Image (spheres, rainbow, N blue to C red):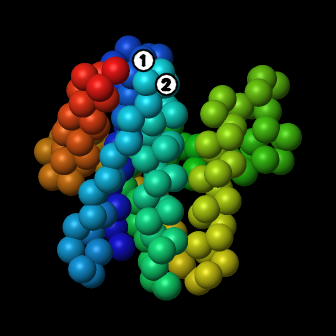
Amino acid sequence: MTIHTDGGCLGNPGPGAWAYVAQTAGGQVRAAGYAGDTTNNRMELEAVIQALRLAGERTDGNVTVITDSRYVEGGIGEWIRRWEANGWKTRSGSAVKNRDLWQELQALKRALQARGFRVEFRRVRGHAGVELNEACHRLVTSTIAAGRKGR
């Protein structure tokens, strides 16, 4: 399973959304969600969390999560191990932002791995013509617009 993810908001903080487009053996699965007051980084993380939840509904397999977020890439690929070892403190000693989401993401990843999944994260450049990354971005934009209309 390959899942493209994206998150964003109008203003930072502001109204935001997350989205994913998953390629599965049965075709594509798309999902998105809205938050009235959030940050871009929280929405990027929420997209990955929701993608891993979808992957968890499968019985076995490998998962590749594709993000355009350097924050997600650096956090899951490198920083999270240091944060955990340092009691969720950054190098400077301040509290890790979005700790709740990082912990949830790490728990989902570990649960999948415990079930035999290989979980991989890759970053693509945003707005560079990667078809499913662009589709995620359009989902984020339309979800924010629909969420703001519904207020």
Question: Residue 36: percent from the left, percent from the top?
Answer: 43, 24
Q: Nearer the viewer, residue 115 or 119?
A: 115
Label placed on residue 38? 2
Callout 2: few (<14), some (14-19), or many (20+) C-alpha neighbours within 10 Å? some
Q: Nearer the viewer, residue 133 or 34?
A: 34
| Viewer can see residue 91 | no
Callout 1: few (<14), some (14-19), or many (20+) C-alpha neighbours within 10 Å? some
Question: What amino acid is labelled 2 in the image?
Answer: Thr
Name the quarter where the C terminus is drawn. Answer: top left
Residues at marks 1 and 2 touching, judged by CB atoms closer than 8 Å: yes
Point 69% across, 48% down: residue: 103
Q: Nearer the viewer, residue 104 or 65?
A: 104
Question: What amino acid is labelled 1 in the image?
Answer: Gly
Q: Secondary structure at mark 1?
A: strand
Of pointers 1 and 2, the one earlier in the residue sequence = 1
Q: Which residue is mark 1?
A: 14
Question: Residue 123: percent from the left, percent from the top?
Answer: 38, 50
Q: Nearer the viewer, residue 98 or 72?
A: 98
Question: Residue 124: percent from the left, percent from the top?
Answer: 31, 48
Point 82% across, 25% down: residue: 93
57 lies left or right of 133: right
Point 15% across, 52% down: residue: 131
68 lies left or right of 45: left
